[in-house]
Image (cartoon, rainbow, N blue to C red):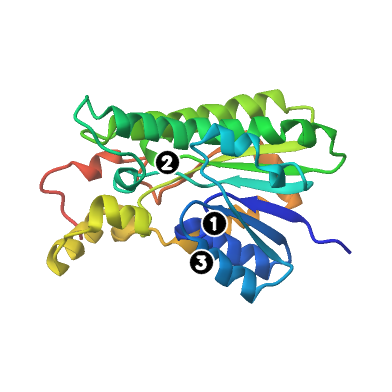
Amino acid sequence: MKKKKVLVTGGTQGVGYQTVKMLVEQGYEVHLTYRKSAGVADELMEKHPGIVFGHKLDQGNVEEIIHADFLTEHEWHGVIFNAALGSGTVKEYAEQGTDLNAATDTAMMTVNALGPLWIYKKIQPMLEKKETPTKLVFVSSVGGGLAAFPKFTLSDGMSKCAVAFLAKQLAAENIYTLIDVFCICPGAIETPMFYSSTLKGMTPEQRKAFDLAQAKKRLIQPEEIAFWMCELMKDESTVLHGANIDATMGLASRPGIQTEAGLEHN
């Protein structure tokens, strides 16, 4: 019996990496994209030959997406639109200038919002011809997808808001098809991206205080979000078609904890 194929963009670190591992354990053939982490992709392919396949792709480059033949060479059971830039990692992607931080804003909007849109447009004709169910999972964020936070990078939140809207629009367009669309909005996750943007430079005491200030007094772990990514690949997830899933441990319900002064943690 042929394995179901799932594509995970940004599958070499953080949530994407954990999702790839869990999907393999659950019997899927997994294809992942990466931009710089060729070594991690190679390790996964060597460990799981014929099961994991890595594809170099910069989803902020429309020409690369247009010529990414692997996107249309497979009948995807699921596509997880996970790759994105954060406020820290964007500096590694875009050459910074002084013109209103235009490079940062352009990179955020291009990679985080237009990239998933372009990939969807590339695979859309194939998806519409399929006679079996397909699961599309878009990854937004608590910031932009569910709530707003003072002093957060504006283009970051705007890009994540755009992703949530894209998922909502595609859900509306696929009410009568076999394509199921979901958006998942995580809170603060302990990933390299979050370390780069927020945790880097903290003393152990500052880190402890920071963790205690979070919802449930801790950061979300990548495997916790990966678990739900995998659950959305199951047939039973159809009832959640169109859902904008709050995966924040309550942060979206009380976003003020990020900025409240003197909050007691007991």
User: On the image, which quarter does residue 177 sit in?
Assistant: top right
Which residue sits at x=75%, y=47%?
A: 76
The nearer-to-camera label among 1 and 2 is 1
Helix, strand or loop under label 3: helix
Residue nearest the observer in this picture, 19 or 115: 115
Q: Quadrant of the C terminus?
A: bottom left
Query: Whole-Å distance between the Cαs marked 3 and 1?
Result: 9 Å
Q: Position of residue 68 (x, y in %)?
A: 65, 42
Distance between the alpha carbons at the discs numbered 2 and 3: 25 Å
Q: Is residue 30 above or below residue 9?
A: below
Query: Residue flagged by tag 1: what amino acid is it?
Result: Gly
**Residue linked to disc 2:** 141
The amino acid type, in three-letter code, at marker 2 is: Ser
Viewer-nearest residue: 217 or 35: 35
Residue 33: percent from the left, percent from the top? 57, 52
Answer above or below: position of 17 versus 168. below
User: Does residue 135 sit above or below 54 in this rendering?
Assistant: above
- CA gap, disc 1 to disc 2? 17 Å
Is 97 left, or right, of 13 in this rendering? left
Q: Residue at x 47, y 39 (%)?
A: 140
Q: Which mark is residue 11?
A: 1
